[in-house]
Amino acid sequence: METIFENQIIPMPRIGDKAPEFKAVTTQGNIDFPKDYNGKWVILFSHPADFTPVCTTEFMTFAKMEKEFSDLNCSLVGLSVDGLYSHIAWLRTIKEKIEFRDMKNIEVKFPLIEDITMEVARKYGMIQPGESSTKAVRAVFFIDPNGIIRAIIYYPLSLGRNFDELKRALIAMQTADKYAIATPADWRPGEDVIVPPAGSCGVAKERMEAEDVKCKDWFFCTKSLPLN
Ligand code: BEZ
């Protein structure tokens, strides 16, 4: 996959790739990405523009949930192709004036990258000219503690993200890493997980006989995880 920008072909990062490196100015100072986040999960996300309503609701929701993400060892980093002073003015306006659902007086404390040159947005395939060549789409990159891209979700400009899903996806990936399992459709924390399919006849037999595994067939086995 690639995007073509001013006749230049830019490959789009994929799941399993190392997160492209960049240095940037943000509303919380300079960052060296992903180096500054070694050992942590990061959600790097783009939004189309400051002072737009859908983006405002998204930032308020992310800011409200920031503690939930940091409790999961996950930092949030936002980006749009606006400048630093626009970012600062927008975040101040959100805190001072905007109410949405049960949220008001919301302070955005995570970094918001200024990317007027679109250098970072292009590196991450956030500019998708079929949707807009002047604004980033709503991209979400989940980057693991080793700096590897683990999941990517894109939304069009008109669609505000579902933040419960972002949190669910993060927990599911962390759970899969910790227990070497997979998670089924619509999995929620606390529910049974999928035991990866057996790779040999011997393993298939063992699995069908194991006490802690529930199998409907040799390839379809689930188990519960310790409560934590
Ligand atoms: C918004 O965030 O409201 C928005 C941004 C760009 C296009 C459409 C909506």
Image (spheres, rainbow, N blue to C red):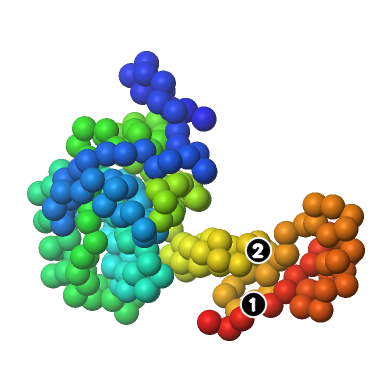
Is 135 in front, or is 77? 77
For the residue labelled by badge 2, is the local secondary structure a helix, a strand or a loop?
Answer: loop
Q: Which amino acid does label 1 sit on?
A: Leu
Residue 181 seen from this side: yes
**Do residues under tags 2 and 1 come within 8 Å of each other at their CB atoms?**
yes
Is 13 in front, or is 136? 13
Residue 107 is tagged as none
Residue occupying the far top of the picture: 7
- The quarter of the picture where residue 203 lies is bottom right
Residue 155 seen from this side: no
Is 45 in front, or is 197? 197
The residue that mark 2 highlights is 181
Residue 225 is tagged as 1
Ligand 1 closer than 8 Å to the CB at disc 2? no
**Residue at point 80% right, 57% down?**
198
Q: Distance between the residues labelled 2 and 1?
A: 10 Å
Residue 74 position within the rendered picture, expressed as x and y whole percent measured from the top left: 37, 63
Residue 166 position within the rendered picture, expressed as x and y whole percent measured from the top left: 46, 62
Q: Which amino acid does label 2 sit on?
A: Ile
**Residue at point 32% right, 61% down?**
75
Residue 11 position within the rendered picture, expressed as x and y whole percent measured from the top left: 44, 28
For the residue labelled by badge 1, is the local secondary structure a helix, a strand or a loop?
Answer: loop
Badge 1: few (under 14), some or many (20 or more) residues near its Cα, within 10 Å?
some
Please indicate whether residue 185 sits to the left or right of residue 11 in the image: right
N-terminal of the pair, mark 2 or mark 1, is 2
- The quarter of the picture where residue 161 lies is bottom left
- The quarter of the picture where residue 37 lies is bottom left
**Residue at point 68% right, 70% down?**
193
Badge 2: few (under 14), some or many (20 or more) residues near its Cα, within 10 Å?
some
Please indicate whether residue 227 sits to the left or right of residue 63 in the image: right
Residue 4 position within the rendered picture, expressed as x and y whole percent measured from the top left: 41, 23
**Residue at point 29% right, 62% down?**
59
